Image (spheres, rainbow, N blue to C red):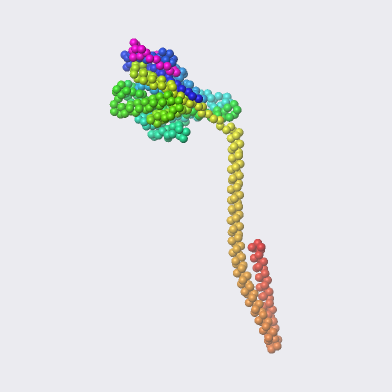
Amino acid sequence: MCDNIKVAARLRRPLLRESDSILIAKVKSENTISIGRNEKDECKTFQFDHCSTYSDNALEDQEQLYELLARDYLLHALDGYNTCIFAYGQTGSGKSHTMTGSTQCPGIVPRICQELFEVRDLYESSDDQLNTQFKIRCSYFEIYNETVRDLLGREKCRIRERPDKTTYVEGLKEFEVFCVSDILEYLSQGNERRVVGATQVNELSSRSHAIFTIDIEQQEITPLGHTLERKSSIKLIDLAGSERASASKTTGEHLKEGANINRSLSTLGRVISTLAKTKKPILIPYRDAALTWVLKESLGGNSKTCMIACVSPCDYEETMSTLRYATLARNVKTSAQVNAHELPDGREQILAMKAQLEELQKALSQVDNQRAIGERMEKIKLTNQFLESRIEQERDLTASYYKKWAQATSERDSLMLLVGGILGSVQETQVNALRGQLSSLKFRSEKFGQRLDLECNELKYDSGE
Ligand SMILES: Nc1ncnc2c1ncn2[C@@H]1O[C@H](COP(=O)(O)OP(=O)(O)OP(=O)(O)O)[C@@H](O)[C@H]1O
């Protein structure tokens, strides 16, 4: 969905030091602000989506600005849109007062935090079946002299581009927050570490661009029992103030800071004017400054964005320049989309998990089978080795029996020959002795034969034949 950047002008009250100055700006209606050098000068009028002025009650002014302008950006974020609110203006024009404010007079950031947790509590405590679970995280960084510094961590960080061309701060610390005091604690910790300096125009001048991000993740159970997940982020930005060196009487380090601030703000101006002029932009100079590079999505991408142009009631040139800048921003279009998708419902998840479990069990039993087969193979191998060595032994034994048997047989044969040859010439007693010898040899030879058969049979049985 295409949306123009919403632009509001906020006129701050004259400060004590300005009590003698001529008031050059006036809010004429809720959409119109006019500006003239003096009462006689012809006034120039500017139209914006919203114009707010001051009253005697600063707290009420803060409340009103939140209700009429800023709350919508919390509601959009709860619907799943990325949103961004940034305060722009000269130094001392009321940007920090508008975004952060003070404990007595809180600005937009603490109010958004407060209401976000009220909404969260309401949803989560509801007995309604359409329950929503929240996960809220925050991070805070500043861009000082073109360097990104994590205000809640220690590191200097770098800006990176994702494959889809969106940008992010690498290594930025993000903290999950569970209640409003958690998030306000991180906000105040970060504010304490922000680079602040005194200039002639503002005693507590912010010398950096500060970007506080709230990431919201919601999981909602729909009436059909599905889970809808929404992810969105709210970027809340307090820019450093534009300044003329002569007006703010800056010198040395402050002059360098001022030059960097002005350079990045003028790049922001060029990005805005290129986006405002071109329907299909060819080259937007996002990369020319860390600020525009990191805000790429908020300025020309998936975001609902609001610019609050803070103006002083007494400085004609600066106020005029801010209002011109703001007018240009009104023509910039962004293309915000709801970042939501349905998660697979519970039943589907259970079925998918069951199928996965079955597959795992199958794989496991295959592994078990293979292990059992392996173990049996190992046993068979050992048995084979044992049998082979037995066969070898038996073979040696058989060979030695054969040898003995052959010897016994030839001994018997030669004895029989001898008996045959000498039978006539020997005494009966000699014959009987020879006969005894012969029958003993016969008996031994039969025994050898039997033993041989027995060994052969055993061998056959062991080798499984
Ligand atoms: N609407 C307002 N009502 C009352 N006081 C205001 C308002 N806006 C600003 N102020 C006061 O004006 C002074 C300067 O405001 P602030 O510090 O917010 O300016 P800034 O734009 O953030 O300046 P810088 O860019 O130098 O940081 C502060 O004392 C602040 O309290």
Q: How many numbered marks are there?
A: 0
* Residue at 62% from the left image edge and 67% from the top image edge: 394
Q: Main secondary structure of the magenta part?
A: loop
Residue 111 in sight here: no
Asked whether residue 190 is drawn in magenta, I would say no
Image quadrant of residue 219?
top right
* Residue at 48% from the left image edge and 26% from the top image edge: 335
Q: As drawn, which residue projects farthest toward the bottom?
A: 425
- Above or below: residue 415 compared with residue 391: below
Image quadrant of residue 104?
top left
Q: As drawn, which residue projects farthest toward the top?
A: 40
Q: Could you tell me which quadrant the C terminus lies in? A: bottom right
* Residue at 61% from the left image edge and 41% from the top image edge: 358
- Above or below: residue 457 compared with residue 214: below
- Above or below: residue 151 compared with residue 393: above
Give 280 or 21, whichever is nearer the viewer. 280
In this picture, residue 211 sits left or right of residue 350? left
In this picture, residue 270 sits left or right of residue 245? right
Image quadrant of residue 300?
top left
In this picture, residue 321 sits left or right of residue 336? left
Rendering coords of residue 79 (x, y %): 51, 25
Rendering coords of residue 91 (x, y %): 35, 22
Give 265 or 363, whichever is nearer the viewer. 265
Q: What residue range appears in magenta? A: 36-56
Rendering coords of residue 113 (x, y %): 46, 24
* Residue at 43% from the left image edge and 25% from the top image edge: 278
Give 345 or 84, whichever is nearer the viewer. 84
Rendering coords of residue 76 (x, y %): 49, 24
Residue 253 in sight here: yes
